[in-house]
Image: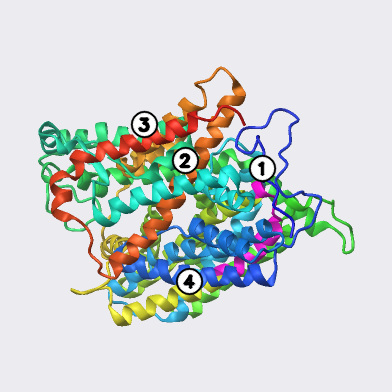
Amino acid sequence: MEDKKPVSLPENAQRELKPGEKYVPILDPAKKYAEVTPYSVCLGILMVVLFSAAAAYLGLKVGQVFEAAIPIAIIAVGLTSALKKNDGLAQNVIIQSIGGCSGAVVAGAIFTLPAIYILGVEVNFWQMFLSSLLGGVLGILFLIPFRKYFVKEMHGKYPFPEATATTQVLVSGESGGSSAKTLVWAGLIGGLYDFLVATFGTWAETLSTTVMGWGQAMADKAKVVLKINTGAAVLGLGYIVGLKYAFIICCGSLLVWLVIIPLMNLIWGGSVIDLMGTGVMTTIGEMAPEQIFKDYARHIGIGGIATAGIIGIIKSFGVIKSAAGLAVSEFKRKPGAVADKVERTDEDLPMKTIVWGVVIALLAIFAYFAFGGVVNNVWQAIVGLLIVAIVSFLFTTVAANAIAIVGTNPVSGMTLMTLIIASLILVAVGLKGNAGMAAALIIGGVVCTALSVAGSFITDLKIGYWIGSTPKKQEGWKFLGVAVSAVTVCGVMLVLNKTYGFTGDQALVAPQANAMAAVIQPMMNGGGAPWLMYGIGAAIALLLTLFKVPALPFALGMFIPIDLNLPLLVGGAISWYVSTHSKDAAVNTARQEKGTLIASGFIAGGALMGVVSAILRFANVDLFLTEWNAAYGEAIAIVPFLLLIAYMVYSSMKTNKR
């Protein structure tokens, strides 16, 4: 067997291309590789089953949903290397792409479907399975026409943090050498760091201004508080996101936490505001800032995300138009006519296949709604179908955009809005009570899975673009991954419901589903929606667009908790510093790339050890130093966090040439 040649991403992999410049991936577009093999497909399916079951189990039991892409990539690299497989890199992309369906389908399912049980409504396996399967299929089909736009035309303009980390794992594992050593060391440091925090509570996971007396007084009286997550994975994410987007995201977050929440307390501090008819009895002034954010201010972010998504659809009308034009041209092509030849790395599933796939999927969804016990009549099934089709199509690009920018899919916020819209419309067409709640949740489940899968899939396609995989093969085999994951997740959910249940003293946590149930129940009984908050978010998004500020990252900042946003700014600042400190552009580039490896290691290590920590929690292995953490956790947390920052800066700056 030949020794491995050093492999690395091209220099222009993560920057915008100059006029006339072309990105050439690692795998030669002119050559064919053994990508889809019995080995890669079987291992991919095995990864889907294992990680779907684990993610569903842990997500429902301890309320922690982990992303499986990076752990799967690490396992794939290890096995392929141990077995000395030819075309290992090409096969690992397929393994990761199929296996990555697990986290996406799990999120789509457990965010919504357990709420049906929580509300006391019966549902069978086939109803849950079809909700996950059809939603996943729709998400894939709606995203494919936008592949070229997101992964090729926007090359270097979006950071793709999760795709970057996963690609670094695959590439470094293939090549070995100094890059692999850097990644492994960073993974060990980041993983151990996050493991000490999550499992033992050696220091606080979040630093807050409330640790100081004056900070607690500000939080109690003025509702002003700042928090920062001290985790290695989040810091690494910020480095890859970069300073520009991290700054915009944090501006959105600071607007909510330093202006809107204190202003709400100042104006309505003595009032009880029940926006959704849920029976709130607490005044704004009696609430903690975190509760005000959760119950009120966060909805501003949801309104902003939805509006920014619609604006994005309007702005990308040219992309939609070209995709539609391609579909029309394919349908007009005479049988036997030869299509224009494209490079292997630019081959998608035929547009005719995608169009027919969407039509068949929508017909299947209609049949499922009309004859699968979801709604009462054909008219209501048509209404449900329209909700799914319109919302899924509009928000697919929002999910992809969010993943491309910050690596976080705001699927819970978009699903919450979908449930509210679906509930209002279903009530208007005469579907109320238990039947209405079940129908709205199944509709929400289809949409949630579609958006979750679309967001996850754009990551896979970007990984494939950087490495040089065949998109057509990734797209085709993604359907199998979704189907296997849907069977696994729904089977696990049924078993867990019979074993533990979702209500009662010993019930599963299922926090997202409980939140969805709390929203939908009053909606089906005449409650309202937080339209005021949505409207404020929409107005902010429109103003930002008017002043040419990217509205989506700003709105994501308003939606995502501030403790997860501020470390993005720290990581982005480190990225800016190491990539601009030298007068030699080549040195700056080398340092930037070294920092990207370290950041990817932090993310990979944090993801792996997060799974281990969650398993220990599920197994009731309690190693958390509760009293120590409460007494000293925040006081000492700043020290290891600063050491982590120093390590990232020092290691990156040690590099002087590429």
Location of residue 580 with respect to 135 vertically, above or below: above
Q: CA distance from mark 2 to mark 4?
A: 36 Å
Q: Is residue 476 magenta?
A: yes
- Contact between labelled residues 1 and 2, with CB atoms less than 8 Å apart: no
Q: Quadrant of residue 496?
A: bottom left
Please give the residue where the numbered disc 2 appears in the rendered image: 308
> How far across and how far down the image is residue 454, in percent?
54, 56
Amino acid type indicated by mark 3: Cys
**Height in image: 403 above or below 225?**
below
Tell me how far mark 2 sits from mark 1, CA to CA: 22 Å
| Residue displayed at 88% across by 57% down | 338
Q: Which residues are magenta?
A: 465-482
Circle 3 Cα neighbour tier, 10 Å, few/some/many (<14 / 14–19 / ≥20): many
Q: Residue type at mark 1?
A: Lys
Q: Main secondary structure of the magenta part?
A: helix
Specify few, some or many for label 2: CA neighbours under 10 Å numbering under 14, 14-19, or 20 or more.
Answer: many
Q: Which mark is residue 152?
A: 1
Q: CA distance from mark 1 to mark 3?
A: 29 Å
Q: Which mark is residue 50?
A: 4
Q: Which residue is mark 3?
A: 251
